[in-house]
């Protein structure tokens, strides 16, 4: 009997039909893309960051195109956890895909309270704890830049949650491996990396920064080599699954991350270029498996040959 290809991945008891997620901040609350693609084909949706109270975000301009990428300084704009539960979650609960909610906060207490409220809801499969956003003055990277604060934030959110926890890490640190080991020790069920790199663009005619926040987060193909190296280093150093993101635009990029050790991937900036990008990558994975005779995604993960 011919064995079928199996793209499924299971993390902390949650089974995903395939390893392709859409990244937080690039897919809204899911509904925005629902008319453009078949959401049920995705491995899962990672919603944009949710905070305790609504946030207006940073002053405009908030985005700027760069060579091989983009800068964003959105500032975690969102409607707050209560409105998210009332207005956005009902749509997500109806979708035939996994739902992961990204959580952010100004203080440790805010992270914990958001986690508690979301943990009481049905239809959410995992929480991604954002300790890596570079575009806010309080919270975000302030918790993810040092081992002690990263450990404390993940430990407290994990202890407050009935749902599995993903720790989302920043590349804007001295040693991302140490941070990864800290959040693993704190109980993270998985680790996602990388968030954006700090970047800046200048209008030479006006002699002013292009972004209203002056600096922003750089994403897209420009950061892929950095993301790939960090995923490879972290995957070797921790036992929990690693979810890779950073400049993945096509099947070739995706395969590089799997070989480097990522168990799953997230598609981010590519969604702005082509809303179908994630589905094309899933189709490409099926084709690659068929061509190479690969049966399971696990047979590809971490198979980079180092001489």
Image (cartoon, grey):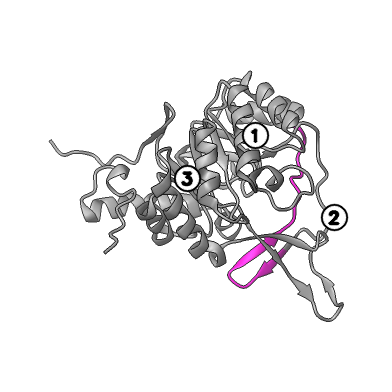
Which span of residues is magenta-colored? 64-80
Quarter in which the C terminus is drawn: bottom left
Q: Is residue 45 visible?
A: no
SS class, disc 2:
loop
Give the CA distance from mark 3 to mark 1: 19 Å
* Residue lying at 62% horizontally and 73% vertically, measured from the top left: 67
* Residue lying at 34% horizontally and 41% vertically, measured from the top left: 7
SS class, disc 1:
helix
* CB-based contact (under 8 Å), mark 2 and mark 1: no
Give the CA distance from mark 2 to mark 1: 28 Å
Spot occupied by residue 209 in the image (x, y as percentages of width and height): 81, 69
**Mark with earlier residue (2, 3):** 2
Q: In the displayed image of the protein, which residue is found farthest to the right?
A: 206
Q: Around disc 3, counting alpha carbons within 10 Å, would you say few (fewer than 14), some (14 to 19), or many (20 or more)?
A: many
Q: How many marks?
A: 3
Observer-nearest residue: 162 or 88? 162
Apparent side of residue 29 relative to residue 83 in the rendered image (left or right): left
Residue to which mark 2 is pinned: 59
Q: Is residue 284 visible?
A: yes
Residue to which mark 1 is pinned: 153
Is 72 one of the magenta-colored residues?
yes
């Amino acid at each position: 009997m011919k064995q079928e290809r199996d793209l499924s991945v299971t993390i902390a008891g949650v089974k995903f039909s395939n390893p392709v997620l859409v990244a937080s901040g690039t897919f809204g609350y899911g509904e925005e893309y629902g008319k453009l693609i078949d959401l049920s084909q995705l491995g899962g949706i990672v919603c944009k960051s949710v905070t305790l109270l609504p946030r207006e975000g940073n002053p405009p301009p908030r985005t700027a195109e760069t060579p091989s990428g983009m800068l964003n300084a959105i500032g975690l704009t969102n409607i707050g956890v209560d409105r998210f539960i009332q207005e956005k979650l009902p749509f997500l609960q109806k979708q035939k895909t996994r739902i992961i909610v990204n959580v952010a906060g100004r203080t440790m207490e805010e992270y914990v309270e958001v986690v508690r409220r979301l943990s009481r809801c049905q239809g959410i499969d995992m929480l991604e704890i954002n300790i890596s956003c570079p575009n806010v003055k309080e919270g975000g990277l302030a918790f993810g830049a040092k081992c002690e604060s990263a450990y404390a934030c993940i430990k407290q959110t994990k202890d407050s949650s009935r749902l599995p926890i993903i720790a989302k890490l920043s590349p804007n640190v001295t040693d991302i491996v140490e941070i990864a080991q800290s959040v693993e020790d704190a109980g993270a069920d998985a680790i996602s990396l990388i968030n954006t790199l700090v970047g800046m663009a200048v209008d030479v005619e006006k002699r002013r920064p292009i972004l209203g926040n002056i600096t922003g987060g750089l994403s897209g193909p420009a950061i892929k080599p950095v993301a790939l190296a960090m995923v490879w280093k972290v995957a070797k150093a921790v036992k929990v699954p690693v979810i890779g993101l950073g400049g993945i635009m096509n099947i070739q990029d995706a395969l590089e991350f799997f070989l480097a050790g990522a168990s799953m991937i997230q598609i981010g900036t590519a969604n702005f270029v082509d809303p179908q990008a994630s589905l094309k990558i899933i189709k490409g994975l099926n084709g690659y498996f068929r061509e190479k005779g690969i049966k399971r995604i696990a047979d590809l993960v971490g198979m980079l040959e180092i001489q």
